[in-house]
Amino acid sequence: MQKLFDEVGFLDTRCYEKFHLSEDILMEHAANGMADYIRKNFVKNSKIIVVSGGGNNGADGLALARLLHGDFDTALFYVKEPKSEMAILQEKRAKAVGVPTCKELVSCDVLVDAIVGTGFSGEFNDDLKLVLKQMNELGAFKIACDVPSGLRQNGQVANGAFEADVSLTMGALKKSMFLDEAKEFVGSIEVLNLGVSRDVYEAETNWHLLDLEDLKLPHRDKKNSHKGSYGHLALACGSKSGASILSALTALRFGSGLVTLVGYEDEVIPETIMYAHELPVNTTALACGMGLGDEFSTLELDKFLDNTLPLVADADIFHMPILLEILKRQNVVLTPHAKEFAALLKQTSIADISVEVLQKNRFEYAEKFCSLFPHVTLLLKGANVILGKDNQFFINPHGTSALAKGGSGDVLSGLVGALLAQGYEPLEAAKNASLAHAKLALNYMGADFSLTPHDLIEGIGNL
């Protein structure tokens, strides 16, 4: 698990004041980190163009060019003359060692974007858009210095932003790099040391990035146990029963000792899943919403939910009036996608916004919801999943486009439900289910477009 920050200027200032490190020292470490990455991944004499702006992001690029000069065929391309104090100093150093400049962007092995960094907040002018278009069209390996030019601090992306293969970010991870729309631009991400370890550089934060290594699977370490020892998940089986069946099969595969579909129509279900018209007395957790439709009457749904059992709520439930009652539960995990979360925000009078507005402000609205309902665990689906409870937030960036398939969300709900049934706390169930979901997709050996919910379920045994 790694820490995430809105901005790191205060961390740099702490280095100056507490650790007696200068801005120059931090910049030299940043440049050395980028140079080390290039030396490890590209052969000597590879052609490298560093595109430099006028501020401190440009200064980082100028320092990098100086460090690479002599070992690589390095050139500087200026989009703006150096203006900041550090950029002017780094230009003097680069000129002193003889780093050449180029007047136009040409074919190269590595292209480094050092135009603007985390302080950017506006739009590019036409001239800069043209330069960035040329940069994005080059066949070179593309490196963003700190963040891609055009990525704003709130995670929104300016028109014409740089499309990096890797972002070599300075000191700590920025939350902006993990808004959904940023995923197309940041590439892979590596954090560079600025003269002290990250443990020393970083401060406390209530936002964290989940690593795949954080996954805690429901291993069975009791020798004297039976099926009842591992929980009993009951799922509401509605008019689109296929969705709840997928969730049920997932839960059974993910360790729940017993799984029962609760419904009021005759259904053909897999032989490993039980079916009942009443909630089993030994139920330890509930799942509701997947394919629910209109099969349950208000009275039947009230009866299903008339308890204090842990609950995972998904899909159709976000468009039903009973949602407001569900939000009063103490142990509940909500798993909406963007459209469902927009409906949730409207029902709770937090905001009446479009999905487009929500997607550009996911962090803000996740925080608003969790502030108003601090006892509820939120799992907001997307390219980068946001999980939150009260004032603690986590991002799972490991999902892939392979999961963009009907039924994938039903599998996720089954994973959450299985962990709730086995006694996981709601936030831990949500985090571990989300990581397992992502890992299942990453482990899939077929073409990304071919992944189905059944492939995900089948893969659970190999996690």
Image: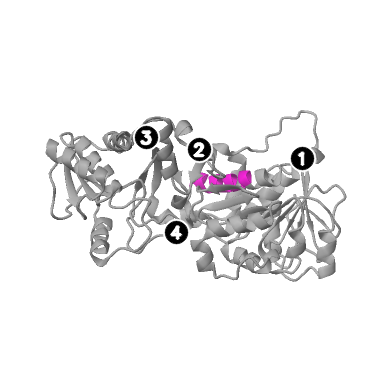
Going by the numbered disc 3, the residue's amino acid type is Leu
Q: Is residue 135 above or below residue 190?
A: below
Foreground tag (4 vs 3):
3
Residue at 78% over, 43% down: 231
390 or 332, which is in the foreground? 390
Foreground tag (3 vs 1):
3
Going by the numbered disc 2, the residue's amino acid type is Ala
Q: In the image, is residue 196 part of the stretch drawn in magenta?
A: no
Q: Residues within 10 Å of mark 4 (few under 14, many from 20)?
A: some
Residue at 25% over, 45% down: 85
Q: Which residues are magenta?
A: 431-445
Horizontal side of 408 relative to 420 (left or right) equals left
Foreground tag (2 vs 1):
2
Estimate the x, y position of residue 337 in percent, counting from the top left: 59, 61
Q: Which residue is mark 2?
A: 203
Q: Which residue is mark 1?
A: 230
The local secondary structure at tag 4 comes to helix
Give me the disc on residue 319: none
Q: Earlier in the sequence, mark 4 or mark 1?
A: 4
Q: Which residue is mark 4?
A: 181
Q: Which residue is mark 3?
A: 194
Q: Residues within 10 Å of mark 1 (few under 14, many from 20)?
A: many
Going by the numbered disc 4, the residue's amino acid type is Glu
Going by the numbered disc 1, the residue's amino acid type is Tyr
